[in-house]
Amino acid sequence: MFRTALGPSNLDRITDFSVVDDTVQLARSVFTALGAGPLAEAAFKDLSTGSADTSDRILYDKATGALSYDADGSGMVSAAVQFATIDNKASLTHLDFFIV
């Protein structure tokens, strides 16, 4: 579970994520723009399929494996913060996230 403050010195690596067996759990106390429960489809963006929009909060760059959080959905008030790298570049969707 991701539950500590986000920042450049707090970057995790997930080496063998399985979309069949694993779920990324996010603490609502850190990921404050997200509601509890399953991540809404509109809040997730795989950047390999296009640009983020204002509803996107969890950004995934499959090419690099970078997983980031954009609290305001625009990157204008606060920039998106990378919090993990998915080493195996799994094909993530909103279904792979749960907010507690």
Image (spheres, rainbow, N blue to C red):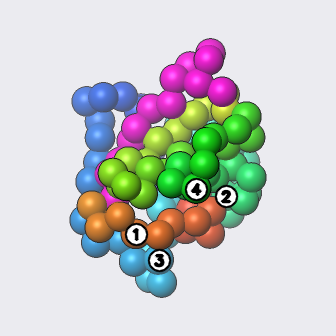
Q: Nearer the viewer, mark 1 or mark 3?
A: 1
The part of the image, by quadrant, that contains residue 39 is: bottom right
Q: Give the residue type that dot 4 points to.
A: Thr
* CB atoms of marks 4 and 3 within 8 Å: no
* CB atoms of marks 1 and 3 within 8 Å: yes
Q: Give the residue type that dot 3 points to.
A: Val
Please state the horizontal and vertical placement of residue 31, each as a whole percent of the image. Answer: 57, 40
Residue at 59%, 24% (x, y): give it: 75
The answer to whether residue 100 of the structure is visible from this angle is no
Residue at 72%, 59% (x, y): give it: 41
The residue wearing badge 3 is 19
Q: Nearer the viewer, residue 84 or 49?
A: 49
Q: Which mark is residue 39?
A: 2
* Residue farthest toward the bottom in the current orientation of the protein: 20
Query: Residues under labels 4 and 3: Cα distance?
Result: 18 Å
The residue wearing badge 1 is 90
The residue wearing badge 4 is 49
Query: Residues under labels 4 and 1: Cα distance?
Result: 14 Å
Highlighted range, magenta: 74-86
Q: Give the residue type that dot 1 points to.
A: Ala
| Quarter of the image where the C terminus is located | bottom right
